[in-house]
Amino acid sequence: MPSRPPTTRRPKLPSSSLPSSSPLADHRTNAPARTRRPHLVLALRTRRPRLVVALLLGALITGTTACAADAPPEPKSAAPASAVAVSEFGGTDLAWIELMIPMDEQLIPVLDLLAQRAADPALARTAQELRAVYDAELPRLRTLGQQAGIPAENPHKGHKMPGLVDADRLAVISAAQGAEFDRQAAECLREHLAQLVSLAKSEIQNGNSPTVKAIARSVVDTRTQVTV
């Protein structure tokens, strides 16, 4: 058999001869801990910014969505002249005016019936006083409706709404006689007044136009003084 070449062994260096900064020294002194710790620290440092970025993006997206949901629509840049003139009116103002006009108009026939046919003199007198209030109030509401661009046609015609006297209710009241007439008409009037005050308070709280809110305050003052 051929002989193997002699093996050359490297001389073993003493531990004191290795600089402390040498990678070999790190490997020799604490190889498992020192080699893994930098990777762990690197992993934590690498993941933490990604987590922070993800959280920030989530917050921005959530905040943007919330702002987009809460923000009112931006006004059109090229608004017509009529829109500038009615800029005082907000959505609540327009809705209140639009509903108040038919509510007043459609109660007047009931007030006229009460003034003519009520067996209770106090009820007849109340109807006459309210008729004067409505006669003064309706022109102001109609003028505001025209200024705000509300269509003259009643959009609530035929609707069944609290406080709004429709044709069916008026027919029932008209057909009643004596004490039953007083009861039916008084009940209708109470429902109307309660709803009117409720709507006026909503306008005062949520409306935008000082002019409309002033009329709403007048409605509350005059209607709450009525006893039926």
Image (cartoon, grey):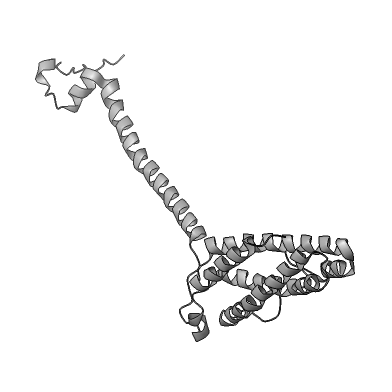
Q: Quadrant of residue 14?
A: top left
| Quadrant in the picture for the N terminus | top left
- Could one spot residue 162 in this view of the protein? no
Q: Is residue 213 left or right of residue 134?
A: left
- Could one spot residue 81 in this view of the protein? yes
Q: Is residue 65 left or right of residue 25?
A: right
How far across and how far down the image is residue 145, in percent? Answer: 60, 79
Residue found at the far bottom of this picture = 81
Name the residue rendered at 34%, 34% in the picture.
44
Residue found at the far front of this picture = 121
How far across and how far down the image is residue 175, in percent? Answer: 90, 69
How far across and how far down the image is residue 91, in percent? Answer: 56, 69
Nearest to the observer: residue 12 or residue 85 = 85
Q: Quadrant of residue 156?
A: bottom right
Nearest to the observer: residue 61 or residue 2 = 61
Q: Is residue 13 left or right of residue 40?
A: left
Q: Quadrant of residue 169?
A: bottom right
| Quadrant in the picture for the C terminus | bottom right
